[in-house]
Amino acid sequence: MAPYARLEVMLTLIIGAVLTALVAWTAGWWAVLPAVLALALLSFYRDPHRVTPGENNLLVAPADGKVVDIARGIAGPDGTPHLRIMIFLSVFNVHVNRSPCAGRVLDARHKPGRFINALNPAADECNECNTLTLEPDAPLPGPVRVRQIAGVLARRIVCVAKPGDRLAAGERFGMIKLGSRTELMVPEHDGWEVLVHVGQPVHGGLTVLARLRQEQA
Protein backbone atom coordinates (compact mmCIF):
# COMPACT_ATOMS: atom_id res chain seq x y z
CA MET A 1 0.00 0.00 0.00
CA ALA A 2 1.09 3.58 -0.68
CA PRO A 3 3.15 5.10 2.16
CA TYR A 4 1.08 8.31 1.90
CA ALA A 5 -2.24 6.66 2.70
CA ARG A 6 -1.72 4.76 5.95
CA LEU A 7 -4.57 6.59 7.71
CA GLU A 8 -6.98 5.99 4.82
CA VAL A 9 -6.03 2.31 4.65
CA MET A 10 -6.47 1.84 8.40
CA LEU A 11 -9.87 3.58 8.43
CA THR A 12 -11.05 1.62 5.39
CA LEU A 13 -10.06 -1.66 7.02
CA ILE A 14 -11.75 -0.83 10.33
CA ILE A 15 -14.95 0.66 8.88
CA GLY A 16 -15.17 -2.04 6.20
CA ALA A 17 -14.79 -4.81 8.75
CA VAL A 18 -17.38 -3.30 11.11
CA LEU A 19 -19.94 -2.69 8.34
CA THR A 20 -19.40 -6.15 6.87
CA ALA A 21 -19.93 -7.75 10.29
CA LEU A 22 -23.07 -5.69 11.01
CA VAL A 23 -24.62 -6.43 7.62
CA ALA A 24 -23.72 -10.11 7.92
CA TRP A 25 -25.46 -10.21 11.32
CA THR A 26 -28.61 -8.50 10.08
CA ALA A 27 -28.86 -9.33 6.37
CA GLY A 28 -26.74 -12.39 5.70
CA TRP A 29 -25.11 -12.56 2.30
CA TRP A 30 -25.68 -8.83 1.65
CA ALA A 31 -22.50 -8.39 3.67
CA VAL A 32 -20.61 -9.00 0.45
CA LEU A 33 -21.45 -5.43 -0.66
CA PRO A 34 -19.55 -3.48 2.06
CA ALA A 35 -16.73 -6.03 1.79
CA VAL A 36 -16.38 -5.45 -1.96
CA LEU A 37 -16.55 -1.66 -1.51
CA ALA A 38 -13.81 -1.79 1.13
CA LEU A 39 -11.60 -3.89 -1.14
CA ALA A 40 -12.20 -1.47 -4.03
CA LEU A 41 -11.12 1.47 -1.87
CA LEU A 42 -8.05 -0.39 -0.68
CA SER A 43 -7.06 -1.18 -4.26
CA PHE A 44 -6.97 2.54 -5.00
CA TYR A 45 -4.06 2.93 -2.57
CA ARG A 46 -2.00 0.10 -4.04
CA ASP A 47 1.67 0.76 -4.72
CA PRO A 48 3.20 -1.95 -6.96
CA HIS A 49 6.94 -2.47 -7.16
CA ARG A 50 8.50 -0.99 -10.30
CA VAL A 51 11.98 -1.40 -11.81
CA THR A 52 12.84 1.87 -13.57
CA PRO A 53 15.03 1.80 -16.70
CA GLY A 54 18.57 2.86 -15.79
CA GLU A 55 19.63 4.95 -18.81
CA ASN A 56 20.34 8.60 -17.91
CA ASN A 57 18.84 10.05 -21.13
CA LEU A 58 15.26 8.95 -20.45
CA LEU A 59 12.12 10.53 -19.03
CA VAL A 60 9.82 7.96 -17.47
CA ALA A 61 6.13 8.39 -16.73
CA PRO A 62 5.51 10.25 -13.44
CA ALA A 63 2.14 8.50 -13.07
CA ASP A 64 -0.01 5.60 -14.21
CA GLY A 65 -2.83 6.41 -16.60
CA LYS A 66 -3.48 7.31 -20.23
CA VAL A 67 -1.64 9.88 -22.34
CA VAL A 68 -4.23 12.52 -23.29
CA ASP A 69 -2.03 15.24 -24.78
CA ILE A 70 1.45 15.66 -26.27
CA ALA A 71 2.48 19.21 -27.21
CA ARG A 72 5.83 20.35 -28.60
CA GLY A 73 7.17 23.88 -28.71
CA ILE A 74 4.58 25.35 -26.34
CA ALA A 75 5.52 28.22 -24.04
CA GLY A 76 6.79 27.05 -20.68
CA PRO A 77 6.58 29.00 -17.40
CA ASP A 78 9.58 31.08 -18.46
CA GLY A 79 8.25 31.67 -21.99
CA THR A 80 10.74 29.36 -23.74
CA PRO A 81 9.62 26.39 -25.91
CA HIS A 82 8.77 23.25 -23.95
CA LEU A 83 7.65 19.69 -24.51
CA ARG A 84 4.55 18.77 -22.51
CA ILE A 85 3.03 15.34 -21.95
CA MET A 86 -0.25 15.06 -20.05
CA ILE A 87 -1.46 11.87 -18.33
CA PHE A 88 -5.04 11.29 -17.13
CA LEU A 89 -5.50 9.04 -14.09
CA SER A 90 -8.86 7.33 -13.63
CA VAL A 91 -10.01 5.99 -10.28
CA PHE A 92 -8.78 2.56 -11.40
CA ASN A 93 -5.15 3.63 -11.84
CA VAL A 94 -2.33 3.59 -9.31
CA HIS A 95 -2.11 7.17 -8.01
CA VAL A 96 1.42 7.23 -6.61
CA ASN A 97 3.59 9.83 -8.39
CA ARG A 98 7.21 9.10 -9.30
CA SER A 99 10.14 11.23 -10.41
CA PRO A 100 10.56 11.15 -14.23
CA CYS A 101 14.36 11.36 -13.93
CA ALA A 102 17.18 11.61 -11.43
CA GLY A 103 17.85 15.09 -10.11
CA ARG A 104 17.71 17.64 -7.33
CA VAL A 105 14.47 19.26 -6.19
CA LEU A 106 14.53 23.00 -6.84
CA ASP A 107 10.98 23.83 -5.78
CA ALA A 108 7.67 22.28 -4.72
CA ARG A 109 4.80 24.74 -4.98
CA HIS A 110 1.10 24.24 -4.21
CA LYS A 111 -1.57 26.36 -5.93
CA PRO A 112 -5.17 26.41 -4.66
CA GLY A 113 -7.90 26.09 -7.27
CA ARG A 114 -11.10 24.42 -8.38
CA PHE A 115 -12.00 20.74 -8.72
CA ILE A 116 -13.24 20.50 -12.32
CA ASN A 117 -13.49 17.04 -13.88
CA ALA A 118 -9.93 16.09 -14.88
CA LEU A 119 -11.15 15.11 -18.37
CA ASN A 120 -12.07 18.74 -18.99
CA PRO A 121 -9.13 20.65 -20.58
CA ALA A 122 -10.00 23.62 -18.34
CA ALA A 123 -8.82 21.56 -15.37
CA ASP A 124 -5.22 22.09 -16.53
CA GLU A 125 -5.38 25.79 -15.68
CA CYS A 126 -8.17 26.10 -13.11
CA ASN A 127 -7.76 23.15 -10.74
CA GLU A 128 -5.79 22.89 -7.54
CA CYS A 129 -2.29 21.64 -8.31
CA ASN A 130 1.23 21.13 -7.03
CA THR A 131 4.30 21.68 -9.20
CA LEU A 132 7.55 19.86 -8.46
CA THR A 133 10.58 21.40 -10.21
CA LEU A 134 13.73 19.33 -10.68
CA GLU A 135 17.25 20.11 -11.81
CA PRO A 136 17.90 16.88 -13.76
CA ASP A 137 21.19 15.06 -13.90
CA ALA A 138 23.17 15.36 -17.14
CA PRO A 139 22.57 14.97 -20.03
CA LEU A 140 18.89 15.96 -19.65
CA PRO A 141 17.98 19.64 -20.13
CA GLY A 142 16.17 21.32 -17.28
CA PRO A 143 14.39 22.31 -15.31
CA VAL A 144 11.98 19.36 -15.43
CA ARG A 145 8.53 20.06 -14.01
CA VAL A 146 5.92 17.58 -12.80
CA ARG A 147 2.50 19.04 -12.02
CA GLN A 148 0.01 17.08 -9.93
CA ILE A 149 -3.48 18.31 -10.87
CA ALA A 150 -6.56 17.56 -8.77
CA GLY A 151 -9.81 16.33 -10.32
CA VAL A 152 -13.49 16.40 -9.39
CA LEU A 153 -12.97 13.59 -6.86
CA ALA A 154 -9.33 14.22 -5.97
CA ARG A 155 -9.39 16.56 -3.00
CA ARG A 156 -5.92 15.96 -1.63
CA ILE A 157 -2.52 16.21 -3.30
CA VAL A 158 0.45 14.78 -1.41
CA CYS A 159 4.03 15.84 -2.20
CA VAL A 160 6.73 14.93 0.32
CA ALA A 161 9.71 16.14 -1.77
CA LYS A 162 11.36 19.35 -0.54
CA PRO A 163 13.85 21.76 -2.12
CA GLY A 164 17.34 20.31 -1.84
CA ASP A 165 16.18 16.68 -1.87
CA ARG A 166 17.67 14.31 -4.42
CA LEU A 167 15.35 11.95 -6.26
CA ALA A 168 16.29 8.89 -8.28
CA ALA A 169 14.47 8.18 -11.53
CA GLY A 170 11.21 6.44 -10.65
CA GLU A 171 11.43 7.34 -6.96
CA ARG A 172 8.08 8.01 -5.23
CA PHE A 173 7.47 11.59 -4.16
CA GLY A 174 3.71 11.74 -3.55
CA MET A 175 0.26 10.87 -4.80
CA ILE A 176 -3.07 12.35 -5.88
CA LYS A 177 -6.07 10.80 -4.22
CA LEU A 178 -8.74 9.75 -6.78
CA GLY A 179 -9.18 10.80 -10.45
CA SER A 180 -6.73 13.45 -11.63
CA ARG A 181 -4.03 14.50 -14.12
CA THR A 182 -0.25 14.58 -14.03
CA GLU A 183 1.70 16.87 -16.37
CA LEU A 184 5.35 16.51 -17.38
CA MET A 185 7.00 19.59 -18.89
CA VAL A 186 10.63 19.87 -20.05
CA PRO A 187 12.57 22.37 -22.18
CA GLU A 188 12.26 21.62 -25.89
CA HIS A 189 15.32 20.04 -27.51
CA ASP A 190 16.03 18.80 -31.04
CA GLY A 191 17.18 15.53 -29.54
CA TRP A 192 13.90 14.62 -27.86
CA GLU A 193 12.34 11.45 -29.25
CA VAL A 194 8.81 11.01 -27.88
CA LEU A 195 8.12 7.29 -27.47
CA VAL A 196 4.41 7.37 -26.56
CA HIS A 197 1.26 8.49 -28.34
CA VAL A 198 -2.07 9.98 -27.30
CA GLY A 199 -4.37 7.28 -25.96
CA GLN A 200 -1.53 5.01 -24.84
CA PRO A 201 -1.65 3.55 -21.30
CA VAL A 202 1.50 4.24 -19.26
CA HIS A 203 2.89 3.10 -15.92
CA GLY A 204 4.66 5.40 -13.49
CA GLY A 205 8.39 4.82 -13.14
CA LEU A 206 8.30 2.17 -15.85
CA THR A 207 7.06 3.50 -19.21
CA VAL A 208 9.59 5.66 -21.09
CA LEU A 209 7.85 8.81 -22.34
CA ALA A 210 10.80 10.41 -24.14
CA ARG A 211 14.44 9.74 -24.92
CA LEU A 212 17.17 12.30 -25.55
CA ARG A 213 19.32 11.06 -28.43
CA GLN A 214 22.82 10.75 -27.06
CA GLU A 215 24.56 12.26 -30.11
CA GLN A 216 22.56 15.43 -29.44
CA ALA A 217 22.63 15.36 -25.65
Image (spheres, grey):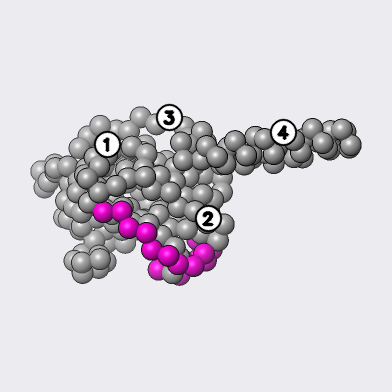
Q: Position of residue 177 (x, y in %)?
A: 51, 49
- Tag in front: 4 or 3: 4
Between 199 and 48, the one lying in front of the other is 48
- Which residues, given as a range, are shown in magenta? 107-125
Circle 2: element type: loop
Report whether 79 appears left or right of 66: left
Q: CA distance from mark 1 to mark 2?
A: 26 Å
Circle 1: element type: loop
Is the residue under label 4 in contact with that under label 2 (CB below 8 Å)? no
Q: Which residue is mark 2?
A: 154
Badge 1 amino acid:
Ala
Q: Which residue is mark 3?
A: 49
Q: Residues within 10 Å of mark 1 (few under 14, many from 20)?
A: some
Give the label on residue 17, or none: 4
Question: Nearer the N terminus, badge 1 or badge 2?
Answer: 2
Q: CA distance from mark 2 to mark 3?
A: 23 Å
Give the label on residue 168, or none: 1
Residue 156 within the magenta-colored segment of the rendering: no
Is the residue under label 2 in contact with that under label 1 (CB below 8 Å)? no
Circle 4: element type: helix
Question: Nearer the N terminus, badge 2 or badge 3?
Answer: 3
Question: Nearer the N terminus, badge 4 or badge 1?
Answer: 4
Q: Position of residue 92 (x, y in %)?
A: 56, 45
Q: CA distance from mark 3 to mark 1?
A: 15 Å
